[in-house]
Amino acid sequence: MAKPVVSAKAGRHLALSRYLENNPLLTDEELAGRLGVSVQTVRLDRGELSIPELRERLKQLVAAARQAAPDPVPSYPLPESGAGYAPVHTVITPAMVTGQGLNCSDYLFVLANRLALNLVNAGISTTRAAKGSFKRPLKAGEKTMTRAVVTEQKGFKYVVRVTSLVRDEVVFEGKFLVFALTQGGAVVS
């Protein structure tokens, strides 16, 4: 039985599709090296196959990952703007602990960072620097109360102190330098 004739271009298109199926983060340069063709040929082939450039593929991967895994730290309702203080109560769940039954510190840090960003109450804000200290690991079932207070503000720069407690015991303390990039939709300069 005779094999169907496959053109070099069709074979290259198939190989290109398979490479990107296995690793969507390959650059055009890496693909050109694997396929033995020029970068321009890879770009033309991608265009013919309607395969987006690396930046777009990366955005698609991030969007798919966000849909597949819900945010471990949801947005929290905060007091009205200008209150300067925001408490959040959290229960450490089994998903937040390691195999040894101790809390993964990243959940508490992300909560503290998110709280600091939300407290600044800017349209868009970013954490410029952070320093935190974990006093002890947490266990599943423990209830934390995390609060944030703006301790200093100079223009668009805010210093936010965040403390997490279990009952009256401090389990995390952090200091966050937050920059407000927009206020009420206007870019801060």
Image (spheres, rainbow, N blue to C red):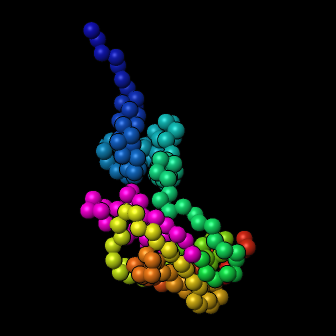
Please give left or right for residue 189 compared with residue 36 in the image: right
Residues 86 and 27: in front is: 86
Where on the picture, by quarter, is residue 35?
top left
Q: Give 50 or 112, whichever is nearer the viewer.
A: 112
Rendering coords of residue 175 (x, y %): 48, 84
Q: Find out whether residue 105 is within the magenta segment.
A: yes
**Residue 10 location in percent, x, y?**
40, 29
Identify which residue is drawn at 62% across, 91% down.
154
**In the rendered view, would you say 21 is above or below 126?**
above
The answer to whether 57 is drawn above or below residue 166 in the figure is: above
The residue positioned farthest toward the top in the image shown: 1
Is 93 covered by the magenta stretch? yes
- Residue located 59% across and 90% down the image: 152
Instruction: Residue 154: tell me if it is visible.
Output: yes
Quadrant where the C terminus is found in the figure: bottom right
Q: Quadrant of residue 20?
A: top left
Point out the residue furthest to the front here: 167
Boundaries of the magenta span: 87-112
- Measured as percent of width and height from the top left, residue 186 is found at 72, 74
Lateral position of residue 22 relative to residue 112, left or right: left
* Res 82 → quadrant: bottom right
Tell me what residue is drawn at x 44 percent, y 47 percent: 40
Q: Position of residue 9 (x, y in %)?
A: 40, 31
Q: How many marks?
A: 0
In the picture, the quarter occupied by the N terminus is top left
Q: Note whether residue 122 is visible.
A: no
